[in-house]
Image (cartoon, grey):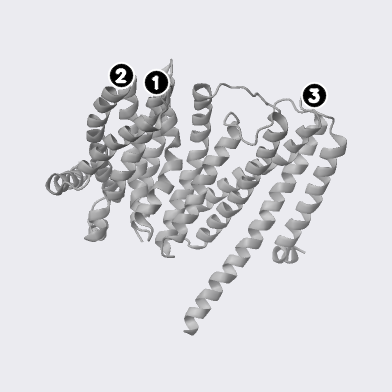
Amino acid sequence: MSTWLRNNSAVTLAAVAAVLLLGGLVLAFTWVPNAPLEGFRQRIFYIHVPVALTAYACFGWAAWKALRLLWTRDQRYDLESYTAVHMGVIFGVLTLVTGSIWARTSWGVWWSWGERQLVLFLVLFLFYSAYFMLRYSVEPGPRRASMSAVYALFGVALIPVSFLAIRLAEGLIHPVVFDRDVGENLAGSQLLTFLVCLGGTIALAAALYVNELTGKRIDARLGELREALE
Amino acid sequence: MTYLADVGALARKDLLLELRSRDTLPAMLLFVVSTLVVFNFSLPADASPRAAYGLLWVAIVFTAILGLTRAFAAEREQRVLDGLVLAPCDRSAIWLGKGIAVLAFLALAEVVALPAFALFFQPVTWELVAGVALANVGLAAVGTLLAAMAAASRARELLLPLLFLPLVIPIVVGGVGASIADDPGRYLAFLVLYDVIFAILSWASFEYVVTE
């Protein structure tokens, strides 16, 4: 059983993700009561926030793998860190899109500089897009691996620092108009739905990660074989 | 002590090189003044006087980029970096020496830029000067590390601003806050925090950027 699980981890994770996400959506649309202020539309919270947390988890995972790479000099961590950043950017873009939709339904605008999470994700999106530029512009090899790792580590330092900066900038440039601390007092049904959705997005990210990593490993191996043939 | 001597020798090398060739600093001075003049025309006549402070910070960050794109040019063209990496000194000394040189260029550019700003736009306050001084440390620390990365890439000068700008957004927030907020202390403290975090991180990780 455990060997089967290991060999089919992407499939298993994808199945778990599908069950949890579908279940979470059903719960979010049918079971959870309407939010007092925002009403029905607040339910996008159950997608938006788990996706955002998953993106953070991916960036954190990438930094952890980067640290392992610098620590052990084991090159296989490079691909793992890169794939985790890749997933983080995908979920980061999803966060931007869902957040933008939420902003539109709540305040009638697609973008608000007053929304901390959105601004933070925009900064992170730019930062991690540059990560890809860096990778594509350096010859593959140990040096690229350690440079990418250092950059990925800077990313996790940048997240809290940027968050603080955005909080500071808010009072400065934009008066705080919107206050939406939905996370603070969740009822039991809301919390459970939220956790199911969070589990679903994390399982989805993990499935995509395993799948992508396998593909990239096969690609790398194929490249080596081609080189050996020539 | 040898560490400090190494750092001193490396910084002196860069400053001496600049003194003889005058490659970077005149360009930075001219650039920062030109930027301020361009900003004068990009602001509407009825803009808040405080907007000028924001533009000053854009000018400082862009000037830093201009200086940083040249920071490792000599090392790359003459393949000095290979020699430095082989030298029996701690690799982080290379970062510190280069960072001190970058900091010196940036500070000299601002010695011209701030009076020009006071002349063209708004008075320069002590909080602004303190903010600029603190921001310089962060800009030089992060910038030197990223410039070394960019120098090793094919895209080179093109890559540096892409890597650099998202990382220095917090510096701009702290700097603008220090120049226009009613309580600049918070923003100055934030700049100190940024400097400490990223200087330590850059110092510790530079070795991995320059070695194979």
The kind of residue tagged 1 is: Pro
Identity, as a three-letter code, of the amino acid under mark 3: Pro
Q: Is residue A150 visible?
A: yes
Q: Farthest residue to the top: give it.
A: B182
Where is residue A162 drawn, in percent x and y? Answer: 50, 35
Q: Earlier in the sequence, mark 1 or mark 2?
A: 1
Q: Looking at the picture, which amino acid does disc 2 mark?
A: Pro
Which quarter of the picture shows residue B59?
top left
Label 2, residues with CA under 10 Å away: few <14, some 14-19, many ≥20:
few
Up the image or down, B139 lies above or below A86; here it is above
Query: Looking at the picture, how far across and down is residue B81, in whole percent?
Result: 26, 57
- In the rendered view, would you say A9 is above or below A153? below
Instruction: Measure the C-alpha gap from mark 2 to mark 3.
Output: 50 Å
Left or right of A219? Residue B158 is left
Same subunit: marks 2 and 3:
no
- The picture quadrant where one finds residue A188 is top right
Q: Is residue A146 above or below residue B173?
A: below
- Image quarter where the C terminus of chain B lies is bottom left
* Secondary structure of the residue carrying numbered label 1: loop
- Residue most extreme to the right: A30
Residue placed under numbered mark 3 in the picture: A36
Badge 2 is on which residue? B123
Q: Are marks 1 and 2 in contact (CB under 8 Å)?
A: no
